[in-house]
Amino acid sequence: MNQELSQSIRGGRKFRNSHRLLAFFSVAGVLLAGCSQSDRPASNAEASAKNVRISELSRIKEAVEPFFQPMQSRDHDWLQDHPENGETFEEYTESKPILPTTDRKTIYILPVGNFTPAERKMLNLTAEYMRAFYDLPVKLNPERPLGNVPKGQSRKVYGNKLQIRSGYFLNAVLPKLLPNDAAALVCFTNYDLYPEDTWSFVFGQASLEDRVGVWSLSRLGGGKADGKISLSRTLKIAIHETGHMFSMRHCTKYECLMSGTNSLMETDRRPLDACPECMAKIAWAMKYDPETRYRNLSEFWRKQGWPDEQKAMADKANAVFAAGEKR
């Protein structure tokens, strides 16, 4: 498969008069559907159990819909530049997505660069949030230096700012470091990234097939933004791109963590949670009980001292519980 078509870009800007990458993500979703898992027909029992689970999660979706706003695309937003159809929960279950397995279920986080104590704290919190969000083991690896970058895989912009081509990580570095038991390998770097010469930068990029992705902390605020804003942005980008590695496409129905973003301003408008459609995808893919998931996320925010997020997750858990009681 064409390597360019098998990757998903998160945010970023293209240089003017460049149109090469506008539509590749939706094409990738079509191609991916035919190359992820075996086409072995399901038994009647398996098909029946799957249908029951899908029906149950469809009902739970309705319980949490009041907590989310419909997507309202503004000028210069992602959907203005990258029109996409989105993907329903039911479409996702039929797309043969790449999922964790018994032997491949751990998310690894690999820091590349020299990190400040504040950045290291954010990485630890990212690992903790990922555990609660996806219900998978998460391991934070030791930091690694960038090392020598081959010619043509970096550039200097804005005076003397070093940027690394994201494809260098995806194609040359991370596949060699992917553990056998990895559901995904997430590389965090504080170097700025760009996907192609025609783009000025990108927040992150993930392979939709190879279970690897890279994200930059360079543009998330650092010392110029307060700690809560930087953490919020980091969590959103990390969770979003990891979702792509489980074959989740951009959300276009709701204001959702899985919606595409063109800028930090748009990223800041997104919630720190998946919408009803994407929540159902996660619950189905990870075999994760939605009420338990919301309570785990509420506990994470309680420990961080974020009462609004704590309450929002607890309210969703209570809504899911109430929906079950009414059956």
Image (spheres, grey):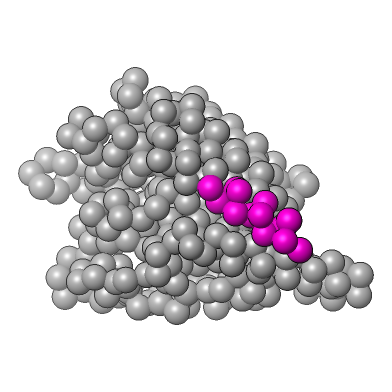
* Relative side of 150 to 56, left or right: left
Quadrant in the rendering for residue 251: bottom left
Does residue 34 belong to the magenta stretch?
Answer: no
Looking at this view, is 27 or 163 the one in front?
Answer: 27
Residue furthest toward the top?
A: 117
Q: Establish if 307 lies above or below 279.
A: above
Number of marks drawn: 0
Q: Establish if 260 lies above or below 184.
A: below
* Relative side of 50 to 169, left or right: right
What type of secondary structure mainly makes up the magenta span? helix
**Looking at the image, which residue is at 52% across and 33% down?**
300
**Looking at the image, which residue is at 51% across and 64% down?**
65
x%, y% of residue 72?
32, 71
**Looking at the image, which residue is at 47% across and 46% down?**
312
Q: Is residue 113 visible?
A: yes
x%, y% of residue 74?
24, 70
Does residue 322 belong to the magenta stretch?
Answer: yes
x%, y% of residue 94?
68, 75
* Relative side of 269 to 277, left or right: left
x%, y% of residue 183?
64, 47
Quadrant of the rendering where the N terminus is positioned: bottom right
Looking at this view, is 292 or 168 the one in front?
Answer: 292
Range of magenta residues: 315-327
